[in-house]
Every structure is written in structure tokens, then in C-alpha cells.
Image (cartoon, rainbow, N blue to C red):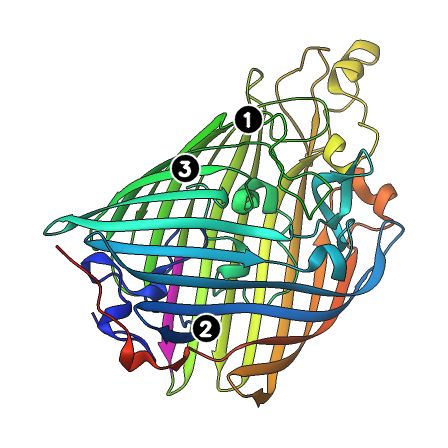
Amino acid sequence: MEMGPGHTEGSARPLGVPEQRAGSGTSWLPDATPMHAIHLAWGSWTLMTHGAVFLQFDDQGGPRGGSQLGVVNWGMLAASRGALGGRLHLRLMLSAEPFTIGARGYPLLLQTGEEYGGAPLVDRQHPHDLFMELAALYERRIADNLAASIYLAPVGEPALGPPAFPHRPSASSDPLAPLSHHWQDATHITFGVITAGLFTRSVKIEGSVFNGREPDENRTDFDYAGRRLDSYTGRVTVNPTPSWSLSAWYAFLNTPEQLPPAESEHRLGAAALVTRSFAPRGTWSAAVIYAANVQVGTGRSASSLVIEGSAELNRNTVFGRAEYVQKSALDLAIPPPPTPFRDVRFDLARRPPRPELHLGFPDASGVPPALYGISELTLGYLREVRGLGPLRAGVGVRGSLALLPRGLEAAYGSRTPVGASVYLRLRPAVTASRGMDQMSGDDHP
């Protein structure tokens, strides 16, 4: 398999799987994904560092919006070497967001998930924890076209969902999280994960046991008190060609939310990621992701769909996202609308519920929860302005337009609230390397 710039056959994983395929946790990306990282050799170890920093001014309109100047960021240091006939990978990923955007995170209309000050975070995106990943991954070939892996992570990501949004090439120029983050890839920071897998050159099957509870509002500690490995998941990934990566997953999460009601849920979904080259120096990437949360006991289901893409040509990047997600009145911290049961009880001739109001199965109170179908369109542009050694700086702008049902108009002041941000991004160039000629080869049996 042809390796990317700065790579040698020694940096490949067992079976010749290239390093470019590695996504967040144990997920796979398309092999054609550009790798923005700095590689160095240190004796028998291969060292790699990568990450991104976005200095941004974020402005979200309407009565529930706000503005903030902050820094969204993450960085990883990884080390790998041959060991016991296979390859050992050690990872440390950190974020300074608890300090650079604060414990309440940044404004983001219609975003939901996690909590602050004993209340749900609504219309804000929570910060990443200081420790995003602290993990060891061991991979070893066990047959001609079969290898096994074990991933042990005091902080890490189970085999659940697509590659997390900061690591998807289709989303890497967008500093803001998708509104469907907690339907798809919110478990990319989990305090306690064990994952085992088998893979060929093109197919991987893996399963995890993990701590299903989301991180708490203290973003600088390790969230282990009163927790255990109480959730599980399985995922199948297929990379049929260097340009494609397809995956599907199912998980049971034991009471993932910090706040009552303490509800467990099933999470399932599928994703298709593609990356291709065009023109002499161009790359485009796209992703289609579907995921749903189904509450245990009631069968209430809330779905999400994301279609996103990015096209890079020379120093110019255009990116966009279209998404649809179903969120409840409880998610959005608004009073529930009158239920159709009440409509029928008091006025049998009254018209049926508005089409934008979707209803699940009744809960213990007998009142079905309202689910609002929310759509949002995002478009952005980034221009790389200069190089700083192995790093590249770029200036970007991003705008979003939400499309809301009538039931949310009063809360948000409009059925089409908007948001905008301008930012400066700093990240490594495409695989800058030093001393790679000294790297040791992968130890295959």
C-alpha cells in the first residue's frame, strides 16, 4: 500500500494498514485522508503530534444566543514501536478548553447535552475535558490476513459512533460541534474503556465495555467516583477502497446523563466517509451519518442525520454541513406543548397536532414527550495565510441558519435563527516529518 508523505513502511500497522486510517479511539478513516501531523524518530520509537487551535469570536443571535471570544483546541502526542511481535501505541490527548472557553463552553444555538451548575447545558457546547485520551493500543498479526487488537483507556473512546467530529476530514475546518453530537459521537471522551477487535486489511469487528456516564462539569479531573464499566457496544467497519470507510454500530448506555431522570438508552447508527483527490493539489471529503437514541423501557426514539463536506484546493477550503435532529422540550429546557391527549379530551373536533410535533410512547406519567424536528445549514470558508515552520495558519468564517418548527419560535424569537463566527486556525501541515529514515520497521511474526 502506498504511504503518504513522510511515511515509510515502518510506520504502518500490522497487515500494512496505514497510519492515515487511524481515527479517534479505534475508529477508521479512509486511507486517502490527509494526515496533518509532525513525526519524529526517537530510538526505536516513532513519535507523532497533531492537533488544532481555533481562536474564534462566536456570535449566536436571538434571545437565547450570546457571543464569546475563546479558543477551541486539542492536541495529541502518540508514541509507537514494535513489541512482542506486534505494535504498541501509547496516546495522550489534552485540551485547554476548560481554561480557554470556560466550564460553560461556547454559545451554540439549539445545542444540548451534559450539565453545568446542576442544570442542563442548553444553547451552549460544553468544553472538552483537560484529559481527552490516555490510552494504550496493542495490535498483532495472528494470520496471513488477520490481526487482533486490544485498547485499554483510563480515558478514551469506545467502539461507538463515527470518528469524532474534530478528527473527520469533512469537519476539520469547522470549529463548532454538530447539533447531533450527543446522538452520534459524544462518547469520544469516556472515563474507562476496554475494546477488543479483529481486523483484516479491509474489515474490522470490535466490541467495548465502558463507563456509560458522561463527564461531569469539573473538566480537569478523572471521573471515576461511583462509576463502573456498565455499558457495552459493538461496531463493524469496512474500508472497501482507499477512498471509503463504512461503519455501523449498536450500544447500550447505562444512565449516560448526569442529571435526572436517570434513563438508560440504546444508541445505534451508521456512517459513510469518503475522501478523494482532485486537481493537482486538491482534496474533498464528505460524510453521511445517521444515529438514533432509543430510551430503554419506553422505546421512545430520537433520530439524527448529518451530511457534511469539505473541499481543499491549494490554500482555500470551503466546507458545509446540513443536519436534522429530533430534540425534546426537556432537552431544550422549554415547557412542553399541549399534548394531543388533552386536545382530544377537551375538543374532539380540534385539528390534529401540528406536523412538526412528533410524539413517542407515553412515559410513566402517561404524557407523551414532544420531539421537535430541528434542521440547520452551515457554510464556511477558510484561507491559509502563512506557514509557521511545520504549522499552517488560516483565517476562516462560518455562518449557520437553523430551520425551526412553530413550537420553538417563541423561545428563539424566530423560526430561522442565525449564528456566525470568525476564527484563526493553527494546525500542522500535511505530515511534516523529521528523522523518519531512522524509524524501525513494524515487527511482524
Q: Is 222 or 202 nearer to us in this picture? A: 222
Q: What stretch is highlighted in magenta?
A: 273-278
Disc with the residue nearer the chain's start (3 vs 1) = 3
What is the residue that sits farthest to the left in this orientation? 144
Q: Do the residues labelled 1 and 2 touch (CB within 8 Å)?
A: no
Name the residue carrying label 3: 194
Under mark 1, the amino acid is Glu
- State which tag comes first along the sequence, 1 or 2: 2
Image point (57%, 44%), residue name:
186
Badge 1 crowding class, 10 Å Cα cut-off, few under 14, some 14 to 19, many 20 or more, is many
Q: Residue 265 carries which label?
A: 1
Q: As displayed, is residue 330 above or below residue 137?
A: above
Give residue 202's quadrant in the image.
bottom left
- State which mark lies toward you, 1 or 2: 2
- On the rendered image, what quadrant is the N terminus found in? bottom left
The nearer-to-camera label among 3 and 1 is 3
Where 20 falls versus 366 (above or below)? below
Residue under the point 50% across and 60% down? 167
Disc 2 marks a residue whose amino acid type is Ala
Which residue is denoted by mark 2 in the rendering?
37
* Label 3 – label 1 distance at C-alpha: 20 Å
Q: Quadrant of residue 269?
A: top left
| The stretch drawn in magenta includes residue 318 | no
Q: Where is residue 265 in the image (x, y as percent from the top left)?
A: 55, 26
Residue type at mark 3: give it. Answer: Ile
Q: Where is residue 206 in the image (x, y as percent from the top left)?
A: 32, 40
Callout 3 crowding tier (Cα within 10 Å): few <14, some 14–19, many ≥20: many
Gap between marks 2 and 3 measured at Cα: 26 Å
Q: Nearer the viewer, residue 62 or 421?
A: 421
Q: Nearer the viewer, residue 28 or 294?
A: 28
